[in-house]
Image (cartoon, grey):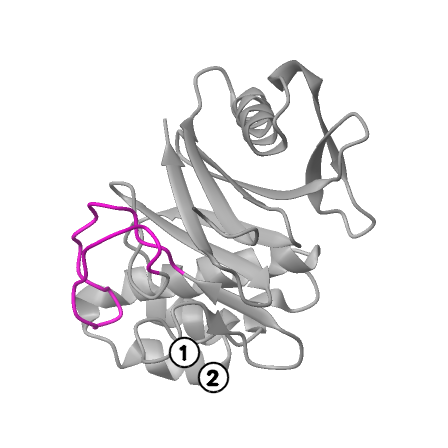
Amino acid sequence: MPGRDTVYVWFGRTTGGRPEAARRLLRRVGGTLLGRAEAEIRVGRDAAGRPFVRAGDAAELPVSVSHAGDAVVVAARRAGPVGIDVEARRELPAVALARRWYAPAEAAWLAGRPAERRAEAFLLLWTAKEAVGKALGRGLRDGGLGRPMPLPGGPGELLRPVPGPGGLRVGHPRLAGDTAGDPAGGASRTGGPTLFDAAAGRGALLLAVAVDGPVDGVEIITD
């Protein structure tokens, strides 16, 4: 049985436009976790602009939404804010972009990766920054791309602390059955979907989750 402070991640597909696909998935998430009919679920935003779902006078359930291609992803957490970001794996000028946008230590680390791993390493850092910004309720505003992140693929806890004050943690959960190697250079891992420290993906997708403080685990649900 998952603990009370579990992060739930739902994957869905857009079939009639992103906004409606996200609303359908949010209603499903809210109905499942709040134990209510989907028709009762309402979506709102807190004072920081972070979305939540609620049914009647039930407590608000913090959620976060991201899109990539035809995929829509919703993360939900009962005990506090959550942020999620998903990106498609793709080629890009990773070193040049990192030197422009990322902290110097991150840009140097990325430049030291094997050439074939740099684009994916760039996107792992990008998704982490996006997820943390969403958990904070401000996205990438106020220098979010320069906010240092724990480097992917290194030693440490599965959900790693974000450098700086506060209790933020971020990581890249792997979906069950994803046998891709860690693009940051670490060993390939397989197993359940609670691993936060390796490449995540559903096919060609990379996923990052951010929370404030430790959590009991993560549960991935796919359509």
Q: Is residue 110 above or below residue 189?
A: below
In the image: residue 102, left or right of residue 198: right
In the rendered image, residue 122, in percent from the top left (x then y), is placed at 37, 65
In the image: residue 176, left or right of residue 31: left
Q: Along the line of sight, which residue is nearer the eye, 172 or 8?
A: 8
The disc placed on residue 104 is 2
In the rendered image, residue 180, in percent from the top left (x then y), is placed at 17, 54
Q: Is residue 44 above or below residue 204?
A: above
What residue type is disc 1 on?
Ala
Q: Secondary structure at mark 1?
A: helix
Q: Along the line of sight, which residue is nearer the eye, 57 or 9?
A: 57
Magenta span: 172-195
Query: Circle 1 sits on which residue?
Result: 107
In the rendered image, residue 144, in percent from the top left (x then y), is placed at 61, 66
Q: CA distance from mark 1 to mark 2?
A: 5 Å
Question: Which residue is drawn at the image coordinates 19% and 61% (left, top)?
Answer: 189
Q: Is residue 96 above or below residue 138?
A: below
In the image: residue 46, left or right of residue 27: right
Q: Along the line of sight, which residue is nearer the eye, 182 or 122?
A: 182
Picture quadrant where residue 131 is located: bottom right
Q: Along the line of sight, which residue is nearer the eye, 118 or 168?
A: 168
Question: Which residue is drawn at the image coordinates 43% and 17% (left, top)?
Answer: 15
Question: Which residue is drawn at the image coordinates 41% and 78% (left, top)?
Answer: 107
In the image: residue 209, left or right of residue 138: left
Tell me the crowding category of disc 2: few under 14, some 14 to 19, or many 20 or more residues within 10 angstroms, Cα based. some
Q: Secondary structure at mark 2?
A: helix
Residue 190 highlighted magenta (yes or no): yes
